[in-house]
Amino acid sequence: MKIACVLFFLLYLQEVLSDLQYDNCGYWVYSKGFGLPEYTERRVLNDVTVYYHDSRTRSKMPCPDWINTTAGKEEWSIIQFWSDHNKYIFTRGFQSATQQFNLTGSLSDQNIYQVTGCCSLYPNGTYRAFITHAFNGKDFLSFDIYRKTYVAVVPQAVQYKNQGESDSFTVDETAAYYKKTCLEQLNIFAQAPEVLVRKAPEVRIIEQQKAGSITVTCHVTGFYPRVVQVVWLGPDLQPVDEGVTDVLPNEDGTYQTRKSVIVPEEDVGEHTYSCVVLHSSVPDNITRVWVVEKRSRIAVWTSLTCVCLLVIGLGFWTCCRSRDAVS
Ligand SMILES: *[C@@H]1O[C@H](CO)[C@@H](O)[C@H](O)[C@H]1NC(C)=O
Ligand SMILES: *[C@@H]1O[C@H](CO)[C@@H](O)[C@H](O)[C@H]1NC(C)=O
Ligand SMILES: *[C@@H]1O[C@H](CO)[C@@H](O)[C@H](O)[C@H]1NC(C)=O
Ligand SMILES: *[C@@H]1O[C@H](CO)[C@@H](O)[C@H](O)[C@H]1NC(C)=O
C-alpha cells in the first residue's frame, strides 16, 4: 500500500515536470522622484527579460534574431506600438492616483504607479491571466478581462475606473490581449535561447548528528530553470521546517534549494534513504542514496567521551588553580 502510494506520487511528480509552467508578464512603471526613467516597460518570460523600453530611449528594441517567423515579427511590431499607448494610459493612472490622494506628483515627492499583467500556462493546460495596478506600493485597481471592468480596490481608484471604462478601445484591446494574444506571445517568447537553457543540478547529502537523531539534508544547486521537486524516500522520516523549502537564486543565474528530514537514531543503519530530484534538465531523475557510515553511531559515543574527558580535565585544572591561589 505504502509503496503503491509512493509510486503513484512519483508518477504524478514526473507528470508535473514533463513540462514547465510558463509565465509571460509585463511590468510597467511610471514614477517620479526616484531618479528612475519616468516610464519603464519590461516583458519577462519566466525569468528572462525579452523586451525592455523606457522613456529615455527614443527607439524601440529591435526584433531579436531568434524570432524568425512572420507571425513572430508581426507580434513584435504590435509590442512596439503598444509601448507608446501603454505609456499614455499609465501616465493617466499616475496622474489620477496622485490627484485623488491629494499629492502634488511633483519631482520633489516620491510617487510610483506600477502595473503588472501576467498570463500563465500550467503544465496541465490551464491558462490564467491577471492585471493589477498599485500606487505607492499598495493595491489600487485590477482589471476583470471577462467582464471588461476595472475593480477599484480603494475609493481613490474610482475616478480611474470610470475614466478607463469610458475608453472602450483600450478596454476591448486589453481584454483581447489577455484572453488570447498573451498566450500567442508566450509561445513565441518560449523560443528565446535564454528560456531554452537547461542546467542540471548538483545533488549533495549533508548529515548532522543531534542527540537521538540525525538530520540529513539534500542540497540541490546549480539548476535552471527554477521549477524543481526534491523528495526524500524512506521509512519514519520526519520533515524539518514543516517540509516547506524555498528555491533561492545563485549569483550565476541558477537556483538552489534544500530539503531536510530527521531520521530517528534507532533507524540508522536499518533502512536505506534516498533523495530523489526531478528537474526538466534530466530525463529521469537524480537519486542519491544516503549511506549510513558505521562510524555514525561510534562518532556519537566518541564525541560524548571526548566531552566527558574535557569536563573532567577542566575540573582538575580549575581545582589545581584554586589550590595554587590559596597557597
Ligand atoms: C528559425 O530559427 C530556428 C532556431 O533558431 C531554426 O531551427 C529554424 O530553421 C529557423 N526558421 C527559419 C524559417 O529560418
Ligand atoms: C483630498 O482633499 C479633498 C478636499 O479637500 C478631501 O475631501 C479628500 O478627503 C482628500 N483625500 C484624501 C485621500 O486625503
Ligand atoms: C491545473 O494546474 C493549476 C496550477 O497548479 C491548478 O490551479 C488547476 O486547478 C489545474 N487544473 C486542472 C484542470 O487540473
Ligand atoms: C529514477 O530513474 C530511474 C531510471 O533512471 C528509475 O529506474 C527509477 O525508478 C526512478 N526513480 C524514481 C524515484 O523516480
Image: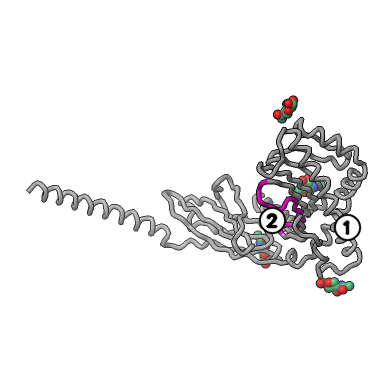
Residue drawn at x 86%, y 61% as measured from the top left:
76
Residue 217 among those drawn in magenta: no
For residue 169, above or below residue 225: above
Residue 255 spot, x, y in % from top left:
62, 60
Identify the disc placed on residue 10: 2
Q: Which of marks 2 and 1 is nearer the N terminus?
A: 2
**Quick check: is the Cβ at mark 2 less than 8 Å away from ligand 4?**
yes
Circle 1 residues within 10 Å: few <14, some 14–19, many ≥20: few
Residue 228 spot, x, y in % from top left:
66, 57
Numbered disc 1: secondary structure: helix
For residue 104, above or below residue 256: above
**Quick check: is the Cβ at mark 1 less than 8 Å away from ligand 1?**
no
Numbered disc 2: secondary structure: helix
Residue 39 among those drawn in magenta: yes
Q: In which quarter of the image is residue 23?
A: bottom right
The range drawn in magenta is 33-47
Q: What residue type is labelled 1?
A: Ile
Question: How much space separates mark 2 and mark 1, taking CA atoms?
Answer: 43 Å
Q: Relative to residue 245, is residue 322 drawn left or right?
A: left
Residue sitting nearer the eye, 198 or 279: 198
Residue drawn at x 82%, y 53% as measured from the top left:
125
Q: Relative to residue 183, is residue 52 drawn left or right?
A: left
Residue sitting nearer the eye, 177 or 30: 30
Residue under label 1, please give it.
78
Identify the disc placed on residue 54: none
Q: Which amino acid does label 2 sit on?
A: Leu
